[in-house]
Image (tube, helix red, strand yellow):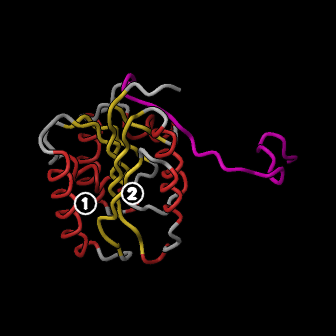
Amino acid sequence: MSKNKKEIIFLIQAFEQPRILKKIIEKSYEFDKVKVYGFTRKIHAVNNYSLLDDYDNIDYEISGVFTDKKYSNRIFSYLRLLWSIYSNHGFKEKLLYVVGIDLRILSFLVINAKIDYVISDIVWLYHSKTRKAIFRFIDTRLAGKSRKVLFTSRGFYDAHYSAYVQESQVEITENKLATYGKVQPLETLKE
């Protein structure tokens, strides 16, 4: 795959997610420069992101450490992230690859950005009725304003986003887990 684009900027919720690290590495073959801003989590401190050091065109910055369920403590980390983006990239046109609703909300504040938004889980489904309605409204509108929306399930798009996101914006990349020959597809199981 030849590189045809200059730079992509990742905004990620957790450096420890293997599927995100895999995507960063994949994009390093497409782009001249890959800049990654993200967070680590106290509960998942495995430091597997050091494998990014093996790629000359990938530069990453840890913008903070998150503690689970302490959402108000994240505000300063998000402000620091926003400051880093503007300090390093200014107001020029940017391509952002954003993972998660909280960072998608933050990316709304990044001027002159084209945004590819990854929805791997719909977190607002797990909230109370009022919070669910508020977050659904925000999320579906921001998804519709994204350049691309990447889902890990066709069902997410069909059930929750099809009225807000055009089919031409959608990319489905299902999470496929390695079965190591131990798991059979459901249709082959006997009843």
Q: Say left or right for 3 vs 129.
A: right
Q: Residue at x 19, y 64 (%)?
A: 80
Q: Residue 72 placed where, x, y %?
A: 22, 74
Residue at mark 2: 123
Q: Hey, which residue is sitting farthest front in the picture?
A: 56
Q: Hey, which residue is sitting farthest top in the picture?
A: 168
23 vs 13, nearest the viewer: 23
Q: Quadrant of residue 97?
A: top left
Three-letter residue code for mark 1: Thr
Residue at mark 1: 130
**Crowd rating for badge 1 (residues with CA inside 10 Å; few <14, some 14–19, many 20+):** few
Q: Which residues are magenta?
A: 167-191
Nearest to the eye among marks 2 and 1: give it.
2
144 vs 30, nearest the viewer: 30
Three-letter residue code for mark 2: Val
Badge 2 or badge 1: first in the primary sequence: 2
In the rendered image, the vertical position of residue 130 relative to residue 69, given as above or below:
above
Q: Residue at x 76, y 44 (%)?
A: 186
Q: Secondary structure at mark 1?
A: helix
